[in-house]
Image (spheres, coloured by chain):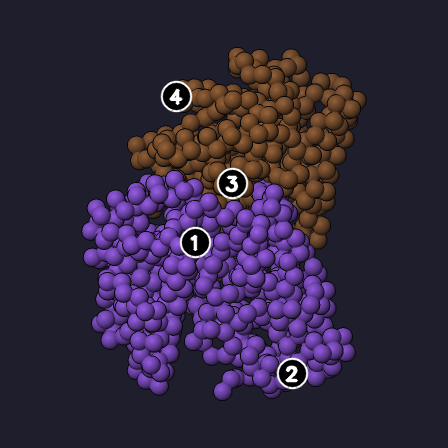
Chain colours: A brown, B purple
Amino acid sequence: MIAHATPDTDTALVRQLTHVFGEQVSTAQAVCEQHGRDESYHPAVAPDAVVFARSTEDVAETIRLCAEHGTPIVPFGTGTSLEGGVAALSGGVSIDLTGMNQILRVSAEDLDCTVQAGVTRKQLNAHLHDTGLFFPVDPGADASLGGMAATRASGTNAVRYGTMRESVLGLTVVLADGRTIHTGTRARKSAAGYDLTRLFVGSEGTLGVITELTLRLQGIPEAMSAAVCSFPTVESAVQTVILAIQSGIPMARIELLDEVQIDACNRFSKLDHPVQPTLFLEFHGSEQGVVEQSEMLAELASEFGGSDLRWSVHQEDRNRLWQARHDAYYASLALRPGARGMTTDVCVPISRLADCIAETKADVEESRLLAPIVGHVGDGNFHLVFVIDPDDADELARADAAHRRMVERALAMGGTCTGEHGIGYGKIDFLEAEHGEGVAVMAQIKRALDPHNLMNPGKVLRL
Amino acid sequence: MIAHATPDTDTALVRQLTHVFGEQVSTAQAVCEQHGRDESYHPAVAPDAVVFARSTEDVAETIRLCAEHGTPIVPFGTGTSLEGGVAALSGGVSIDLTGMNQILRVSAEDLDCTVQAGVTRKQLNAHLHDTGLFFPVDPGADASLGGMAATRASGTNAVRYGTMRESVLGLTVVLADGRTIHTGTRARKSAAGYDLTRLFVGSEGTLGVITELTLRLQGIPEAMSAAVCSFPTVESAVQTVILAIQSGIPMARIELLDEVQIDACNRFSKLDHPVQPTLFLEFHGSEQGVVEQSEMLAELASEFGGSDLRWSVHQEDRNRLWQARHDAYYASLALRPGARGMTTDVCVPISRLADCIAETKADVEESRLLAPIVGHVGDGNFHLVFVIDPDDADELARADAAHRRMVERALAMGGTCTGEHGIGYGKIDFLEAEHGEGVAVMAQIKRALDPHNLMNPGKVLRL
């Protein structure tokens, strides 16, 4: 069963939308339900209607009509958010952007491109295939680039190439009153006025709907190689990473899987890694540079008791390795058939990462929970999936409490309540714990740009 | 002569400030005049009083008292802004942050630190000397880090290490109503709410006063080397850089000086480079990596008719090279004794940089002006100094017109009206030309956070 926040959105609005957009509007129950559900454990809430936008002007017209009726607007990309971002908590209209899937421009000389918001990262990379360029931000899911910007997504290779914060040069955004603005330019840097681009990146649809993005691209490196290394403890793995970063080894990916997670991945992806804390690594550079980087890393790893590096040089082997990493969530669920996953992430200064993980693991054990850990360890970011029986209220309560302690622990260590999943409606309390009076400033900005609280209401901020 | 915007700030306010702060307050004419003047060609405007703050609480108390009296506040770092940022256009109180010069914390493991806003970049780097770390952002002037954040400064090595936008992890900011907020955390990345850090970076004191900063640091590379390469044309130099970037050569600095500028530098810094468009380059990495990078670059350069690379391997030679680059402005002025400099910068997509420079040079020549060009060419950013006779109204008008055409040209090419100097009160018209309706959104944010327009009024936005 999926909740509906309101019995029906203003039928006059639906009539108007249908008049303007015809078959681009749906109020079919199945369509609405699909648009209120993401990949999180948070309850889905269906919108009352869905508009399938094909252009910025479609989005602007939908928002203008909704604004006239005081009806909430919830943008929808691929529905892969992890904190309930697409749930229509106050009902209203979902704007589905998947039809806005045009790649508008690629400049190989400038290493940039402009795309519509519904283009997914895999679609963009397929399009770039022959250009020698790629778009690096990779959160696992084949999310839409508009959605990735809206949630400030990052992923496995942010340690080298940055997150959406660093990758977006400019945006086209439709505001709550239907105005369309263009933020940023194609210049690499600018000191011209307030950084509206960075304000909308990570605002989760609460300040406006992103319809187009200008993105930085990267040159495909001459050489890439991936390796796996096992460690006696999480701490020794993290110490290796800290020293590697201090030494300036420009690792492209450096992922930590704890022994619970590597066991799950071994079973699910038919691998045979030792059941120990493990680093999955990838190096990008010149042929010579990649060899040099990996030799330096291997030397550091051995100082901390790491195993010899096991190599995946061929594209096929590398894909298999990273597919296993991306499937970590499903591997975790498969440890306990019938169980549900409750996923979360935090990010701390890397000097505190080993402590944060160790204390969290101890807490999970004391709380009699199953919760594998994977981490973008170069960024100090780690994820945990509580694998729980959805019918066991006591277990759910223990997971909730352990989750709360995990976030409090991260905040006490100078970290953040989410490195990349976002706030949605799942982490609003934690945002307040993290930012205090800063949340009041966010609310001032929200009220200035969306005085009637129509843009994805109930997300990020509690007004 | 220096202008005073108002005959006197409320004497009751000065009495209150003196009561609270004693000798930390000055209304001496010389002190006020110094605090209204920066390094730009824009007319200086003195504040009516200066408070020498020693703590965030001093700043907060000053702002609270000013707010009670409706008196404007202008923050002051080192006075090295280039668009009139410190001019007290509506009078009021200058808050001098130079006394807030404590380095509060350095973490070598996390490659970060926390400093008070008055710490300068050279002071920080001297402090870091034995840690193996450095702070890379280098705008030339030994500016305060608070001021650098406020103007979103960058400089010669932004191409490798980013600008202040990428280098600030978090801020302590005092708002217009005296509240103090802490933005960001020590985590490398976060998806927790609106990016207030990036909103205050580049806001030029118009939304609040930055009092503390948490900054990313970089590991000092194992090897560094610098080189100079001459080219037949600006275009061939720029094409070399474009291919170098596409090839992923991670250059740390790559500066273009046109033949007018290199001639000026030769004379001023007693160098003997050929009077041709010239690249100043610096490579950072492992011993082997630096050799590899420079060999790749040399090969590309020779394809475009570049000279052999002339090396500066020793620290002393490198310092001499970069000192000459930093002295480019003074070298330009020395071309014409008694002349004044009118400096500006724009930033365009790198594919348009050669055209933008060529058209600008042609315009300068047709306008019978002297205007050397230097550029952070890897970013598409270039600077131009009109070297003019301050008493020649006709020449000034020609320079103004050529400047306007240069910015319009950059905007038409998809660029920005300033890559790193900021808007201040010199480029407000250009900001409007660049961002259109976006400026209205910036004004909505400004009004939400500073409803009485007391924070550095008249800068960035015209309300």
Q: Name the residue that disc number 1 marks.
A: B157
Residue A202 higher or lower than B427, as above or below: above
B71 left or right, relative to A131:
right
Query: Label 1, label 4: how many angstroms apart (C-alpha)?
Result: 35 Å
Q: Are marks 4 and 2 in contact (CB under 8 Å)?
A: no
Kindly indicate whether the residue at mark 1 contacts the one at mark 3 (C-beta within 8 angstroms): no
Q: Which amino acid, by three-letter code, is at mark 1? A: Asn
Distance (Cα) linking label 4 and label 3: 27 Å
Q: Name the chain letter of the residue that bears numbered label 1.
A: B
Say what amino acid the circle numbered 2 marks.
Answer: Thr
The residue to which callout 4 is attached is A314
Q: Are marks 1 and 4 in contact (CB under 8 Å)?
A: no
Residue B361: mark: none
Picture coordinates of residue B351, whole percent (x, y): 30, 50
Viewer-side label of 1, 2: 1
Residue where numbered disc 2 is placed: B27
Provide the chain ID for the residue under circle 3.
Answer: A
Please tell me how crowded label 3 is: few (under 14), some (14-19), or many (20+) other residues with Cα within 10 Å.
many
Question: How far apart are the two marked residues, 1 and 2, measured between alpha carbons?
Answer: 40 Å
Q: Secondary structure at mark 2?
A: loop
Q: Nearer the viewer, residue B84 or A28?
A: B84
Q: CA distance from mark 3 to mark 1?
A: 19 Å
Provide the residue designation for mark 3: A247
Residue at the image position 71 percent from the left and 50 percent from the top: A436
Q: What separation in Å lies between label 3 and label 2 (alpha carbons)?
A: 50 Å
Read off the chain for label 2: B
Amino acid type, mark 4 = His
Query: Number of numbered discs present?
Result: 4
